[in-house]
Amino acid sequence: MRDVLVAVVVLGLAWIQGVAAASPQEFDSADIRVSAPNTLPGMRRTFTRGRYELRDATVLDLIQAAWDVPTQNIDGGPAWLDTERFDVSASTRADASPDELKVMLRKLLADRFDLKLRSRSVAVFAYALTLGPRALFSRARGDDAPGCELKSSAQLPNPPGFTQPAVTLVCRNTSASAFARELPTLREASGYLFGYPVVDRTGLAGAWDFRLSWTSRNASHPDPLTVDGTTISDALDKQLGLSLAPTRIPDVVMTVERVSTPATQSLPRAPVRFESAEIHADEPHAQALACGHIAIEPGGRVLLDMTVRQMILETQGDLNSHRIGGETSTIDAPCWQIQAQAPLRDDAVRGRDGALWNGVDIDAMRSMLRALLAERFKLSAHTEDQLLDGFALLAANPVLRSAAASNRSGCGEGPGANGTQPEWQDPRLANPLASRLVTCRNVTLGQFVRQLNQLMPGLEGPMMDRTGMTGRFDIQINFSPDTTATRGRSGVIPFSQALKQQLGLQLQPARVPAPVLVIDHIAEEPTA
């Protein structure tokens, strides 16, 4: 098996080098800037009319885009590879292929980031999609556009036999290999597959029409109703005649041997405002949707039904503090109805694609909403640290592994580099209800606590380190999302329990400093 893996990886690298040798291409021009602060950090990649853009990308993101290697399979290098973000805007031929764009991006990374990598072969965990005695679906008919669409129970009636709300994946004119690639990307399947790849070993050729219904289970926010439902494995077996089996597939780990910060421009983002905005107080009995609704329609029309508090939280995004203090007497009522027009790019496309919603950048929309609050509601605020009810992390009987000095410092969801070790077992596979897995390498306990506060483990308050322990550690913790309705169920591991049993640490209620958004002034009514 080892020889086969090495052969596959060597052939793959040889093919990559061959493409580079056959196509000595580089971008016609390329501009690299430091990314502006963003409420949605995460790389966005587009290629339109010869313009290749990668926004809010770490160097790890850029390596992943250039070599198609998961970021957890990239080790070595300085800590800033995980944290500093760049906007890359490059121009090339409008008909450049995806493989050619990868070659050009590798050349850019070598020239502008002075990047040098070394690779080695590994075998990683995956699922094999196999066919049983017979397929329970039919060959594609007609000329439907290939692809799959996920529909919730709100869009389709609940399938027969389902006692809990289901999701249904409707696929038309789709190959088995495309279906296998689609499954691990679905949030509604993440609590079953945990992002591990699915490889097609059905032997089915051609395109097919089928639908698959299962009980949704989101790894980060599992609905307590879905603990006992139709799993995705049962659905595959009974509805399609397919099955998932654990397997190992060849993969590559890339080590960063050399990298440096590129020469960049750091330009302030131009103020962004709605082109127009009408604001009215909602009639309580006329609301079709509960207060807190937001939608972006095709053409850049933004519709909001929100209180001022909800609008403030929307402008902060998902990664900032939701603690608000100061002048708050008027921010929870009434519910305001806003119809606004956002500027739209010429190449805007319909649908929701990560940070874009019907062609509108969600972070840009949040900047527009922030400007509207300042201009029309006269909002002024500042952020300061205040003592809040929270938790102190204490050392009870610590069981911590000293860090390897060569590891790059940082934390993230999932197994991290552990997943590339052949003897490692993912604890979530044995207990899916403990669906959160946080892996940190070469961190102090202070860094560990700060990362946990950002990753929102579901605690009712912020944490701070009071262990008194020095040094750096490699830490992994596995726990259940804090869903009150599932507490007490077999298999549920509260975060505090995981800390004590897995790391020998404990939480104690305490007053701890944490950032608070303090409102200095807010108008009761918006200006006309």
Image (cartoon, rainbow, N blue to C red):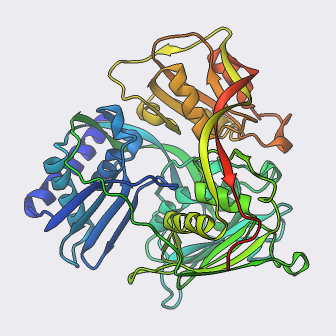
The answer to whether residue 215 is visible is no
Identify the residue at image location x=36%, y=25%.
407
Q: Is residue 93 above or below residue 451?
A: below
What x and y, as percent, mark residue 395?
64, 11
What x and y, as percent, mark residue 296?
60, 76
Q: Residue 416 vs residue 521: left or right?
A: left
Q: Which is nearer the eye, 238 or 428?
A: 428
What x and y, as percent, mark residue 383?
59, 43
Q: Residue 203 vs residue 264: left or right?
A: right
In the picture, residue 466 is in which quadrant?
top right
Q: Is residue 251 above or below residue 18?
A: above
> Which quadrant of the rendered structure holds the N terminus?
top left
Q: Which is nearer the eye, 388 or 8?
A: 388
Q: Residue furthest right?
A: 285
Identify the residue at image location x=68%, y=75%.
527
In the picture, residue 159 is in which quadrant?
bottom right
In the picture, residue 391 is in which quadrant?
top right
Identify the residue at image location x=50%, y=15%.
401
Q: Residue furthest bottom?
A: 142
> Which quadrant of the rendered structure holds the C terminus?
bottom right
What x and y, as percent, mark residue 44?
41, 61
Q: Residue 269 vs residue 401: left or right?
A: left
Identify the residue at image location x=51%, y=87%.
144
Q: Which is nearer the eye, 449 or 487?
A: 449
Q: Residue 516 vs residue 174: left or right?
A: right
The answer to whether residue 363 is visible is yes
Q: How many marks?
A: 0
Q: Is residue 306 above or below residue 497?
A: below
